[in-house]
Image (cartoon, helix red, strand yellow):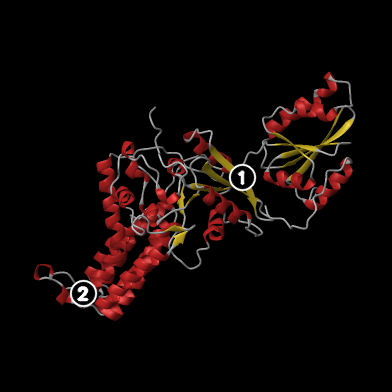
Amino acid sequence: MNRNKNSIKTSISSKLKENKTFMEERVGLGTSFDVGVRDFTILKKQLNLYYLTGLCETPVIVELMKKLLEINESDRSSNKVGELVENRLIHQQVTRVESMDEVVDQLLTGLIVILIDGEEYGYIIDVRSYPGRTPQEPDTEKVIRGSRDGFTENIVENTALTRRRVRDERLRHEIVKVGERSKTDICIAYLDDVADPGLIKLIKDEIKHIEIDGITMADKTVEEFLVKQGFNPFPLVRYTERPDVASTHLLEGHVLIMVDTSPSLIITPTTYFHHVQHAEEYRQSPAVGTFIRWIRFAGIIASVFLLPFWLLLAMEPSLLPKDLSFIGPNEQGNIPIVIQIILADIGLEFMRMAAIHTPTPLATAMGLIAATLIGQIAIDVGLFTAEVILYVSISAIGTFATPSYELSVANKMSRVALLILTSFFGVKGFAIGFTLYILLLAHIKSLKTPYLWPFLPFNAKALIQILVRVSVPMSKDRPSIVHPRNNYRQPKKV
């Protein structure tokens, strides 16, 4: 959490009235309905229990108070009330605090605070119970076979989901708070003996230097501070909502970033090829996984280059051999082909946006209307040619086949740029656009990691594992791009 460097921490007063006045000024005690205090007496000493309605578990608090009030019946000495209270707090997570600033921070997180009259310290008990949903399979990362659980908006549940799969004593979950007002919890997860210490330090430093009121947009705000993307459309970190995918990257030496209130987890560092992999490939046999991967690669390539290449052939029929002379529009429309393509592409984007904002029962009807009425009528009136609809549709399917939504949108923007260059300059424009596309990707670095690795810089062994889904027993080395401290993935036999 970012605080003014010149601020002085306020110590807990031995007078409960002064502490209550502080809470009234700082957190609106008595004004905000969800901030409350419960006064009770233990051995003739007053105690204040501060809580935040909605973020703490009431039955646990009631049970704690019962145990504390039993002190009045079983003990008579009032000299050591603080020790008696601490011993009767039947909870696994009790922390002693001496600063009112920390009291406020923890209270707003959902913990309860107990302050004792005459003592300059208090106790913080973690009884948080955040509202949220149960773990369920992510909509964007569905698999035919495999686990159906997924991350939720609760950071505590998310750490448990990864801990369940990686039961290693060297797994670290370090938590920090970011945002002067939001005080959002961010967890940095890594394997202590595998992850690169330099990468861990870099991520910690970047997160600790985030100075902002709040990160209510959660992971995306953290990403923008972390990688400083600017106007680069290509994703520099990978998002996942699957615990099995996150755990696999932990074992490879990646560092994970979890942000409270977000079900998406950030994987760092990542390359272009991390965004084209899917969990389904590893839930099938190596041969089937490789086949699926190649089909997906073909779809991604088609989403970027198919439309510009078809436009080039339509503009330059002489480039086609006789056997392929049928490629290209059979009849000229009323509108230039490049305009038709761009309009059809924009129309598909309209449909995608409308599908997001349309209730599920109506989404199917909307798709049927768009496909059967708008598309056919547009051809009949001469707005589009049939070939344009065909190739735009194939390109769109390739976009949907891209596992990463961010990458699919970036590729769509690249496709439009290639279309414009090709329409103006023909073969030269297509060649220049293709070259600029590769150079842009080669120039990008994500947290000092080359974006096109293992293609550039070239690593034959790693590239084979990108092109072919290698069986797990054969994958003995961790990816060198993450600079793991322990390169060998499987323990050596003694």
Q: Give residue 53's quadrant in the image.
A: top right
**Circle 1 SS class:** strand
Q: Provide the residue designation for mark 1.
A: 175
**Residue type for callout 2:** Ala
Q: 238 or 377, which is in the foreground?
A: 238
In percent of width and height, residue 382 lies at 25, 75
**Is 90 displayed left or right of 246 in the figure?**
right
Q: 188 or 457, which is in the foreground?
A: 457
In this view, 313 is above or below 368: below
Locate the C terminus and report the quarter of the image it occupies.
Answer: top left
The residue located at (85%, 39%) in the rendering is 120
Q: Provide the residue designation for mark 2.
A: 314
In percent of width and height, residue 209 lies at 63, 57
In percent of width and height, residue 142 lies at 38, 45
**Residue type for callout 1:** Ile
In this view, 446 is above or below 486: below
The residue located at (83%, 49%) in the rendering is 22
Find the residue positioned furthest to the left.
322
Q: Give residue 347's quadrant in the image.
A: bottom left
In percent of width and height, residue 255 lies at 50, 47
**Is 28 displayed left or right of 169 in the figure?**
right
